[in-house]
Every structure is written in C-alpha cells, then in structure tokens.
Amino acid sequence: MKTLQVSLSPFHGSSSAFQQIHSDIFRMLEACKPTGVLFPKLHDLSWEFCEPHLFHYIDLFISPTLQSLSLPWMLISRAKQSTFIQSIVNYSPSLRKVELPRGVPPGIQRRVVSLISQLTNLEDLCIDLEAATPDDVVILAMHRRIRRLHLIIPHVAEEITLRSLTTVAESRSVTHQQWQPFPALECLFTQRLDIETCTAIVAFIKPRGLKEVTVIARPVPLIHQLETYFQTLSACCGHTTLVDITVAADKQSRSSLLLHPGILVPLLSFVRLEQLRIDLRSSLGINNTAIEQMALTWPNLRQLQLGALDDSPGVSGITLQGLIPLATHCPHLESIGFSIDASICEVGEERPGRGITNESLSIIEFGKSPVVDPAAVAAFLADIFPEVEYITAWETSDDAAPDRWDEVERLYEIFAKVRKQERNHIEMDTSSDSETDES
C-alpha cells in the first residue's frame, strides 16, 4: 500500500457506528502490530478524522518511506503537539509534502516551525499559523527546497513588514553574507492576511523563480494597497517566469474599489502571463483600449477575470468590440470573466474583426451586464468565439424576472452550429479546389 486516506466514509449514515467499527480495527492493529513498520511502502497519508479519541492511532502509520502527510486537525493537547511533530521529523525524514491547515497554536508555533525547517527534503508546505511573527516567516524562508508554500495567517502577533523581516534575517545570519529566502520557491499562496503583509513578504523574498502567486486577502484591499502589491510583484518577480496571478478576498464585501487601467500597468511586465484572476467586488473602470493592450502584451493568456462577477456595480467600459483583440491575439484563451456593456451591438455586413475566429474559448462569464438585442449579441459571440460551451450573465439579481441573457444563450447555440456548418463547407470547397488544381 502506497496511499492511505483515513476519513469518515460518505456511505455511512451514522458516524458514531462508523467510528466504533474503526476504533475496533485500530485496536486490533495496535494489539497485533508487527515488529516492523505496519505499511513499509506507504508514501501518502491523509488523516481526516476529527475525533480526538482516534488521533493517537496515527502512530501506526508513520513510516520512514512517508513522502506526503496531510493533517487537517492535530487533536491532541498543545503540550503534546510539538512532541508529535518531532516524532514525524525523526521517523519520516523523507517527507516532501506536509499540510497543517487547521491552526498551529501560538504557544508551540515557533517550535513547530523550527521542526518543519529540519525536513530537508520538504518541497510543498501548507501551514496555518494562528498568530504569526516575522521570526516564523524568516525561519521558514531559510528552507532551501520548498517549491510550493501555502501560508494561512489569521492573525499576526507582531507586525510583519519588510523592515521587521529584514531585521530578523540579519539577526539570524551567522556569516552576515547575503542569502536568498526560499531560493526554490515557484508557487506562493497566502490566505486570511491583509494585502500589505502579503506585499511585505513578496518584497522580502524577491522570488525571481516564482511561477504562480495567489492572495486571498482579509479585509478587501484598498485601491492604493492593491496598486502597491502589483508594483511589488513587478519589481521583485521574474518577468518571464510568473505566469499565474490571483487576487481575491476571504470575505467579500461592498467596497468603493475602482479597478482602473492604471492599476494593471505593472502587470504588463509579465510578458508570458497565462492567468490573471482579480476576484474583488469593484467598479470596472477597464475599457476596450485597456483590453487591447492586455491582449497584445499577453499572447499566452488562457484565463482573464476582472472583478467579482456576482454583482458588479455600475456599467462596464468594455463593449463587445473589446472582445475582438482577445480573439485576435490570444489563441490559447479558454475563459473570460468580467462585466460588459452589451447594450450596443451594431450588426453590419462584415463580420466582427473581419472574420477573425477564436476556437479555444469555452467559458464566458459576464456577470451582471446590460443587454438590449439578444439576437445581435448571440450572433456576434458566435462569429468570433464559435466553440463556447458555457455562458453566464444576467441583467438583474431578481431570479424571477425574465432575462434577455437567457435568450442570448439559446440563440448562441443555434448561430454557433450555423457558423460551424459554414466553416465545414468552406473547408470542403477549398479542399476540392486544391485537388482540381493538382490534377
């Protein structure tokens, strides 16, 4: 056995009966445990039981071959938690992935962080620090092999700033030589902390090899904080390596945030960007010109989301014409999500974008967006994006009210089929002409 997930079974209606069965099994295993390791080839262990009386049985499964350990809960006394982590470090030194996502208490936090730093093979770490300090961040940053880091920080015991992180790093440096925090880091995920702290961590790490960065901020960032964060990313991350950027809020709330084109300018330095997701409730000040600049700068773009889609206030500055540069310059585009002003859709003799067609896009999410002529909008979308499988948009939050976007979705399917037939006929005619010329 190489993979083991210990959790409540979804097929049992009574969790208490299920626990009793497994308690007996665990007792038998403990009583009849072989002299060696119970599962000598076990690589991955996920312990998802949330019953304290069962937790101590996890010792049966800790082995030297273990490479991945997920512990949503450490259901033992705080005094025993650091001892438990020490035993893991001792018995499973080959661990490459550790997940502790349910809160390491402040009393043992420093000890646990220090122990984790001893896992020299560790590449993937998810840890919830209930009250983080600059020391905790710096100790983790001294790890040489961590590639993926997921930091969950509900509270900070001491303010985490670039200055405090630098001061702690200097105090811990024995040789006083320059060193690179997290030198192998490729993916950074920060959650439940304010975006200013996230900015400080990025500025301290300067992760030139970073490929993916995600912030789930609390509270919703202010516009100048978001702008500073993007500027810091541009200044500290490799312009050809960072390809995935996500900013969202842990608890969405109404805000006066205006997402304007200038705020995204620092991100234009990431010329190989593939995914940009800004999931924040905001007024969308982006216009067609800004969308065109993004399309020209990010030809590898696969996903673009600008603002939360559940209830975007105001009317978007992006119209249907603004979609043409995305169709033209982003051949790998799979998903777009932003509010749009579809109330104006002129139907001319020529097809949009002079007949440009992008067959990679499969998901369109326009959220709350105005529309007047469903047939014209459906025809426009079918012309430039003929392979869309999912369209979601609405005019009003009232589910009972008739919505013209429903008609857009219905007509799109019809128009897309017609366009596909037309393309097939053109391809057949072209093929026939080529064969005639050759003969």
Image (cartoon, rainbow, N blue to C red):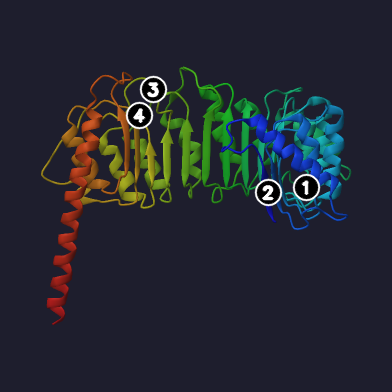
**Residue 47: where, in percent of width, then height?**
70, 40
Q: Earlier in the sequence, mark 3 or mark 4?
A: 3
Q: Which three-letter amino acid code belongs to the residue tagged 4?
A: Gly
Q: Which three-letter amino acid code belongs to the residue tagged 2?
A: Leu
Q: Between marks 2 and 1, how big is the CA–CA gap? A: 9 Å
**Residue 384: where, in percent of width, then height?**
25, 46
- In front here: 12 or 135? 12
Identify which residue is drawn at 16% across, 50% down. Answer: 418
Identify which residue is drawn at 30% across, 40% down. Answer: 323
- Depicted 92 relative to depicted 406: above or below: below
Q: Between marks 3 and 4, how big is the CA–CA gap? A: 7 Å
The disc placed on residue 300 is none
- Residue denoted by label 2: 4
- Residue denoted by label 4: 367
Are dots 4 and 1 in contact, CB under 8 Å?
no
Q: Earlier in the sequence, mark 2 or mark 1?
A: 2
Are dots 3 and 4 in contact, CB under 8 Å?
yes
Q: Which three-letter amino acid code belongs to the residue tagged 1?
A: Phe
Identify which residue is drawn at 52% across, 44% down. Answer: 244
Q: Earlier in the sequence, mark 1 or mark 3?
A: 1
